[in-house]
């Protein structure tokens, strides 16, 4: 049996980019989507950030306010940005307003916002 504490230690040392890559690899290998797990994991991080003293904001949440007229194009872009499956991306777009991506840098948030607005969506940064 694997040493579970060693696995926890190794996972704790991953950067955000490495963790995202690991999630994609596991999704591919196991044929599942980690979208729900990501949403659950982001919850405690968001709560911890709210308790921090006021600082310059470095992490942003991209929120899809409305899909607009070109819903199919918006779904395609949401899939490209988030890596979600078709059904999950469709549900996110149809359930607007909803967060598309959380904890991103200002530059990445602006890029995502521009991409989604280009296809007709209304987007907010929080």
Image (cartoon, helix red, strand yellow):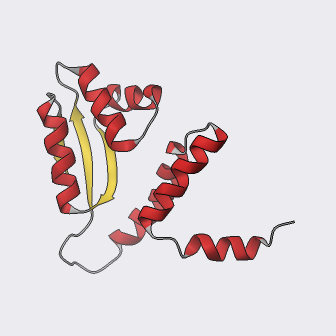
Task: Give the x, y percent position of residue 75.
Answer: 31, 27
Answer whether residue 78 is visible to the viewer in this image. yes
Answer whether residue 126 is visible to the viewer in this image. no
Task: Please determine whether, in this image, residue 108 is positioned above or below residue 14.
Answer: above
Please tell me which residue is depicted at 66% across the width and 72% down the height of the picture: 8
Going by the image, does 27 lie left or right of 57? right
User: Which residue is at the far right?
Assistant: 1
Tell me the quarter of the image containing the C terminus: bottom left
Task: Please determine whether, in this image, residue 123 is positioned above or below residue 71.
Answer: below
Number of numbered tags placed on the structure image: 0
Going by the image, does 7 lie left or right of 113? right
Q: Quadrant of residue 45?
A: bottom left
Task: Please determine whether, in this image, residue 41 is positioned above or below residue 79.
Answer: below
Task: Give the x, y percent position of residue 7.
Answer: 69, 70
Tell me the quarter of the image containing the N terminus: bottom right
Q: Nearer the viewer, residue 50 or 66?
A: 66
Q: Nearer the viewer, residue 119 or 98?
A: 119
Q: Quadrant of residue 119?
A: top left
Please tell me which residue is depicted at 19% across the width and 36% down the height of the picture: 116
Q: Which of 95 and 80 is in front in this view?
A: 80
Task: Give the x, y percent position of residue 115.
Answer: 17, 39
Please tell me which residue is depicted at 76% across the width and 70% down the height of the picture: 4
Task: Give the x, y percent position of residue 120.
Answer: 14, 28
Task: Please determine whether, in this image, residue 18 is positioned above or below residue 29.
Answer: below
Q: Quadrant of residue 96?
A: top left
């Amino acid at each position: 049996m694997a040493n579970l504490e060693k696995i926890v230690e190794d996972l704790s040392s991953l950067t955000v980019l490495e963790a995202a890559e690991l999630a994609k690899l596991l999704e591919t290998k196991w044929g599942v989507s980690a979208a729900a797990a990501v949403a659950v994991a982001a919850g405690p991080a968001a709560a911890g950030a709210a308790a921090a003293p006021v600082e310059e904001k470095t992490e942003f949440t991209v929120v899809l306010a409305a899909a607009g007229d070109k819903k199919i194009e918006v779904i395609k872009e949401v899939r490209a940005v988030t890596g979600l499956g078709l059904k999950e991306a469709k549900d996110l777009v149809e359930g607007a307003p909803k967060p598309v991506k959380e904890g991103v840098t200002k530059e990445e948030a602006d890029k995502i916002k521009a991409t989604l607005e280009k296809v007709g969506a209304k987007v907010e940064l929080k």
